[in-house]
Amino acid sequence: MALTEITLRANNRDTNNSRGPRQTTLFDSLGAAQRRHKRQRKAAGQENASIENSRADATEKAVKRARTEVPECTAAARPQKLCEARSVLAVRRFGMTSAHTAQRYRQQQSLTMDSVFATSRLASLVSPATGVFQLYADTEPQRGVLPLACKYSANGEQLALVDESGFVSVFGTRTVDAQSDVSLEPILRWKAHDNSAFDVEWRADCAQMVTASADETLRVWDVEHQQCMGSFVGHAQTVRSVSWRSASMHCFSSASRDGSIMIWDSRCNKERVDGEYVYRPVNVIGHAHNLGSSKKPMRGKKGMLGGSVTAICHLQHNTDLLASVGSTSEIVKFWDVRMKAHVRPFALPTPAMSTLLSTSSAGRSRGTASLSLDPDGTRLYSACNDNSVYVHNALMPGQPIARLTAPEFECQSFNIGTSMSTCGRHLAAGSSSGNVVVWELDRMGTNSSGRRAVLQAHTKEAGCVAWYPGKDKMQLATCGDDGILRLWEENAKLAESAKTDPTKQCSWG
């Protein structure tokens, strides 16, 4: 019997019931089977829920027994016991019948409890006089020099700083000793560019670094011998930002005030000029953050409402993706560096993905100063000129998932930097007021608790911040327009005494 015939028989009813009772069709049999299977699944679920509830009751009894047997609880054991109790409540209240789900909930709660106890660590951050270095010009010792960027090496053994005079200074990341008479001094220092150096980035093996300068070039340096390995030429204006491709020894990207992003590979597109290798880009993304073409003609051509690319950052989950921000809006764009940007003249390139404008932003669009990626590569933080730091989902971009603000945080220039700690629980940001704001983050990468620390770091704008990448200690480097580099470390005793004794030569949060 065909399917159409069965359907017609099922739907064709005689109003006076002259044909007798309705015949059972194939669809009636299928519906009955589905209802029977649904009842069986429901019964099995109730049985599993009763088993899990009995297990939860046994776990709760065990936790109560442990509390009665051990009346005193140390600070280290208290978070673990609280997390066990919370996991039991989660199983009973929210119906977490899976053991894997309950274990994941315990792990998440342990991260939350650890972040609560880490608040006291931020309160003990202090910068003694032995952790301060004042930059001066070599030709004029009395004239201060502005530091423009500082970055730690991947192993955390060295800190590189570049300044407006084009010099690179490398410091050792020893523990700051407040009782020592030895002040902070660079272990290496050399002239890298004839103009201001705006950014520096270490290679993964810590043997080389790349510097970006206002002389429109980038240079790769052998750190141990202070030797230039090659110049990278192609930008038409100041190079603002540089980022190594994740775990790559040859590929990196750069962003410039000319609105372009260039991709470089030290293995190709090179020629030897005057005894030095000169490299050309392997890919160019032009007009990356332009607003669009103007309707009014300009000298017979359409004019572009140009914008500078202020910061870039390679992602971790996909090394072919590059995130960028510009001076025209708070939108973060994601580019596939493998794709060639073949576009028409005065046409804008199309990114692979991009975020949406925040609903909290009012009025005209404002630019973005910096980008920071968390250690897991799932959260992206952008410091915007509306005095906010937006939190983005790096895996699935859309509207910002959170917004970090503070009365002490002012982002009024494109030199304000941000940095994420190795543990992923602290985000540090410079400020135009000279303070450095450190937000405490939860497991979702947001500041749900509202707790933060404010470091009285500099007398002028604090633009550069960098966290120590190791896990053996907590150290934060900050630089300001007052020409001072500060290293901050945990020292609860010194921080407390500095607040009460004005003769102490140190700064505290």
Image (spheres, grey):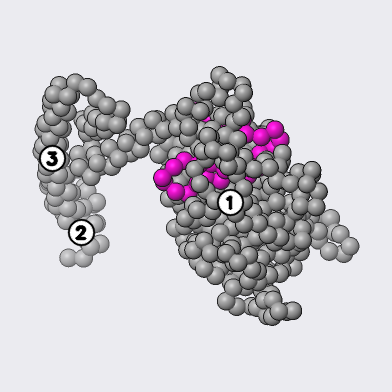
The local crowd at label 1, few if under 14, some if 14 to 19, many if 20 or more residues have their Cα within 10 Å, is some
Could you say which is closer to the camera, residue 384 or residue 341?
384
Instruction: Give the image quarter of residue 202.
Output: bottom right
- Please state if 201 lies on the left or on the right of 17 as rendered: right
Q: Helix or strand or loop: what does disc 2 sit on?
A: helix
Could you say which is closer to the camera, residue 508 or residue 435?
508
Q: Position of residue 199 (x, y in %)?
A: 65, 55
Q: Is residue 269 shown in magenta?
A: no
The mark that comes first in sequence, 3 or 1, is: 3
Kind of residue at badge 2: Ile
Q: Helix or strand or loop: what does disc 3 sit on?
A: helix
| Number of numbered discs on residues | 3
- Please state if 253 lies on the left or on the right of 451 as rendered: right
The local crowd at label 2, few if under 14, some if 14 to 19, many if 20 or more residues have their Cα within 10 Å, is some
The residue at which mark 3 appears reads as 48
Kind of residue at badge 1: Phe
The mark that comes first in sequence, 2 or 1, is: 2
Tell me: residue 178, above or below residue 287: above
Q: Cα distance, mark 2 to mark 3? A: 40 Å
Residue 171 circle label: 1
- Which-is-in-front pick, marks 3 and 1? 1
Residue occupying the point 68% across, 42% down? 134
Q: Cα distance, mark 3 to mark 1? A: 61 Å
State if disc 3 and disc 2 touch (CB < 8 Å).
no
Could you say which is closer to the camera, residue 186 or residue 479?
186
The residue at which mark 2 appears reads as 6
Q: Quadrant of the N terminus?
A: bottom left
The mark that comes first in sequence, 2 or 3, is: 2
Residue occupying the point 15% across, 32% down? 59
Kind of residue at badge 3: Asn
Question: From which residue to which does the magenta span run?
Answer: 450-479
